[in-house]
Amino acid sequence: MRICSIFIVLFCIFPLLPGCSLKIHQPVQSEIIDTNPSPESTRLLEVARDKFYTVDSREELLDSMQAFRNVLKIDPGNREAWSYICNQYILLGAAYTAERSLKRQYYREAMQSCELAMYTHEQFRQEMARGSKPWEAAHTLEAEDAPAMLFWVTALQYEFKEAMTLPSKIVNIRWLQHALVFLDRIEEVAPEFGNGAVEMAYSVCYCVLPGFYGGDEEKCYGYMEEAVSENDGYLLAKWGRGRYFHQVTGDTESAFRDLRWVAGQDLDLYNDPYPWKVYFQSDAKAVLTGKSEL
């Protein structure tokens, strides 16, 4: 009872402290109706995909993002293009940005891009028009929306990790409950999706949420084990386990062991999207050489 009382006091006080901001959902402004593919938009989408899968610098990433925007100029309801842009905003913030304020901006742009991908569903649009929040309308989404849902969750988790002060994390903690709604929907409509990425996102939520908001240590550990098991042939889960999970467990030795493993791999042998595996490995090396904190 005393712990709960302390949390309530902190919850009330922290919004008044410097560096604390309450995250409020801002509805996207969209007139998207339906996708309208054409031979030209299909060609541009192929060009954009090709660009993305060779990105290994900030300049190339920005060029890739513009290529997907070129698709949207012709086909503004293209779900795949919006999902790619969401993914790339996350990468831009995580891999190529140091300033906290810019990271926050990019992660929020990512979430809005994901919501625009979701807007391509008429039922989702109708729910939003009635005043629902995206997570309240998640029940309308289907398997083809799994990337947008997962990237929305990923962007939110990166914002928590890299762009929020401790007071902000405390007052915004319930946003991770919204993330669980999207993850549950992915499990309903696309249970095989993600190659362990969904399980890793679950693990983050259950590790970070306090128990009275649904946090669960057993689920935290269990989902991390599932993520690594299902991520065979990918770097993501072991990088995430080393980079973040073991910070929660306090097992620094295991964290460095995972990161040494990631740093020593031949990228050609792994199936993560090329720009992301470049980031995972470079980030692991930065931690191991002391250029970045664990």
Image: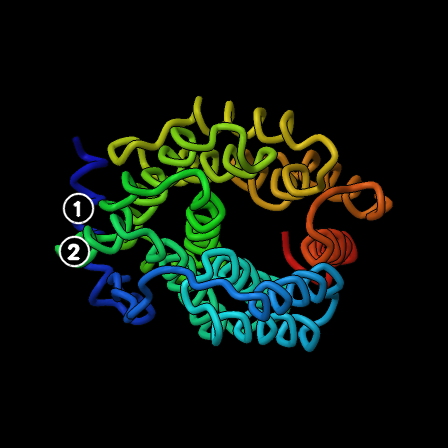
Give the structural element (helix, strand or loop) at label 1.
Answer: helix
Image coordinates for residue 185, horizontal then vertical, percent: 36, 35
Give the structural element (helix, strand or loop) at label 2.
Answer: helix
Q: Is residue 72 left or right of residue 98?
A: left
Q: Residues within 10 Å of mark 2 (few under 14, many from 20)?
A: few
Q: Is residue 240 left or right of residue 181?
A: right
Front one among 227 and 169: 227
Image coordinates for residue 294, horizontal then vertical, percent: 63, 51
Q: Amino acid at mark 1?
A: Ile
Say if 204 sits above or below 29 in the image.
above
Q: Amino acid at mark 2?
A: Cys
Q: Residues within 10 Å of mark 1 (few under 14, many from 20)?
A: few
* Visible residue check, residue 163: no
Q: Is residue 56 left or right of residue 214?
A: right
Front one among 187 and 35: 35
Say if 155 sits above or below 100 in the image.
above
Which residue was labeled with disc 1?
8
Image coordinates for residue 142, horizontal then vertical, percent: 38, 39
Marks 1 and 2, how far apart in space?
6 Å
Q: Residue furthest left?
A: 130
Q: Give the quadrant of the N terminus.
A: top left
Q: Quadrant of residue 97?
A: bottom right
Q: Quadrant of residue 278?
A: bottom right
Mark number for residue 12?
2
Mark number for residue 56?
none
Say if mark 1 contacts mark 2, CB within 8 Å: yes
